[in-house]
Amino acid sequence: MSIAKRRRVALLATGVLLPLPWVSGCSSSGDDSSPAAARQDVAAAARDRVAGTGTLRWALDAAPGTFNAFQTNADSGTQRIAGAVLPSLFTLDGRGRPQRDADYLEAADVVDREPKQVVRYKLNPKAVWTDGRPIGAEDFTAQWKALRGTDGAYWTARNAGYDRIAKVEPGDGAHEVEVTFAKPYADWRSLFTPLYPKSVMGDPAAFNDGRRRGLAVSAGPFMMRRTTGGTKSVTLVRNPRWWGDRARLDKLVFKAVPVKRRAAALLAGKLDLAEVDRATAERIQAAGRAPAKNGAKKQAAAEPSARHGAAGDQRTGDRAAGDRAGQDRVDQEQVAQGGRDAADAMRAWAEANASEKARAKTAALRRFTVRKALEPAYTQLALNGTRGPLADERVRRAVARAIDRKALAELVLKPLGLPAKPLGNHLLMAGQQGYKDHSGAIGGKDTHAAQALLADAGWRPGPASDREKALGAGTDDEGRGGGRDTGRRDAGQGDAGRSERSGHAAAAVVRKHGRPLELRFVVPSGSGTAPLGKVGDRIARMLEAVGVRTKVVKVSGSGYFKDHIASGNYDLALYSWPASAYPATDGRPIYAKPQPAADGSLVVEQNYTRVGTDQIDHLFDQAISELDTGSSRALVGRADARIWAAAGSIPLYQRPQLVAARKTVVNAGAFGFATPRYQDIGFRK
């Protein structure tokens, strides 16, 4: 699945949940700095500790529209299923590093650099498709021709990398394939993953429409058995021709369950593994903390005085009074004996006296645990550089200097027990090879510096007009106007006390030619977006401290992307991008300088901030052609520093990845960057 499509999926998911199996000398930290505990949480277990049978039910965001990962309507479900049934020549480890998959490749190396780059793949001779045919050069050739972008009959999402190949042919040795490149390509390991059989790639009709209902031929530890209900459920079974380690599960069932319905599905016992929102994760964790009760324990919790026998009743002389006194005693005893505070004790007592239905729900949730890690994706503040005050780089830089990124990271990540550190790179996540914090290219939070930049751009504090004062009086105590989806953060007009309480004292609104600096701030709304709403609110208050007014527009559903982000109908916006193991390839369309089209419109690719420079483009072009990994990553780092300096995108933090897993599930959970090893997933013996 193309990173372009995965990024768009994550962006849309941001609008639903708040997601996805995609200048030098200014760095302030070394590379590879990431707490190991935040990279992956999968309940790792050796294969001999995993039961050799069982069915695992795994939630998908939606029913896959196709099983062809290279089509425009492929999604995270397509990618997840493809990973279990198709060859992946290179998988990713927990730090996002490509690793040769020995089930398919015995070797893969650049054997020539001059006059052309040549990569030789030595295939595992045991590797065969489910129809018995060996995986070979004809499959590589068909995939290259389908994805290189020269045949319009193929409805492909993207041709990056394949368009740089000159030819594909069998190698001199048995089970060898040689790929010759017309132009050097640093990210050659990203190609041919997943690899489809020639029966899919060799014919446009099969490519475009033939894989919407299933995959007749595959080559993974699992194979597709059936789809039901418009692919709302996809059942995979063991592949009898699989030559590698035998899958521990009998079946792997992927079920389309929207995030907002997953708590109910977990309670009903219909899922074993599901990414969940923060509210559901907190419910599971709370259920796990509450003590389980049965028999005498239930009686003791419901009537705490009973633990003292008849003497307790004699001291009270009255059952109702005894219950009240017992409640007090259970608080005191649990504080003294169990080290828990009164709030915990009250919660335990309340649970014991709750309805049978509530107790049943708690018991059901206790069967699960929450696996958590930092997702290979980050939330950013986007600044639209083509309209209004933000077209001036000085104003964009002022906004960036007003933001306390550390405080925002702590707001989101600290309550979850994850490393609460702001992300300092657009192209690499903390822990990836070559990661460095380049935020020094723009500077950290500095109110005075932000105000100086605004003043240099002609925006200075000034008094409000009578009309503005009248309008300001119409907002409520949260700064919201009369519209359902809009709110105004107006520095100096009633928010000073609230801002001071939040640690950001409001300043007088800055003005230019008598006009106040007001930015239209678009944030997603709907199920699961409460944490992002808090981030937006905190950013608005931070901007107040430098005299910038914000008008908040809350948007739900797909309109967030289509009607606002893609169309450029915003000044500020919050959304997320997935990270990539191949930043030279996948970063360029995100940050490339927009180019004018023949009709006068602007071609932005995926650069929805519309901010870019020729130098950034040149650094990406150099990085993608540099075959030395260290040198290529250094060029990527220089590009990132320039992206920071342009101030179109301000990374805030890596997103949390929260996965509800049945306690007996092993080798699955919050994978982080790592590619799941599907044959090892199962239930603990």
Image (tube, helix red, strand yellow):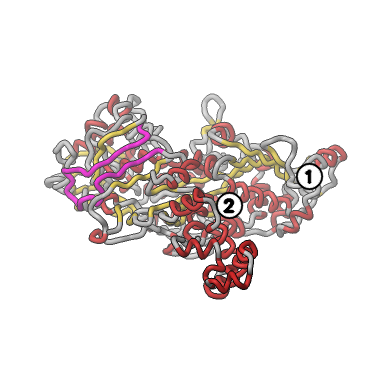
Vertical arrangement, residue 84 with respect to residue 630, above or below? above
Q: Is residue 490 left or right of residue 174?
A: right
Q: Which residues are magenta?
A: 230-256
Q: Of helix, strand and loop, which one carries label 1?
A: strand
Figure quadrant of residue 562: top right
Inspect the magenta stretch and tell me whether residue 67 lies in it: no
**From this viewpoint, is residue 1 visible?**
no
Residue 645 bears which disc, if any?
2
Q: How many marks?
A: 2
Inspect the magenta stretch and tell me whether residue 255 lies in it: yes
Q: Is residue 80 left or right of residue 652?
A: left
Residue 579 coordinates in the image, percent (x, y)? 44, 49
Q: Amino acid at mark 1?
A: Arg
The C terminus is located in which quarter?
Answer: bottom left
Neighbourhood count class around disc 1 (C-alpha, 10 Å): few under 14, some 14–19, many 20 upward: many
Query: Residue at position x 57%, y 45% from top?
Result: 529
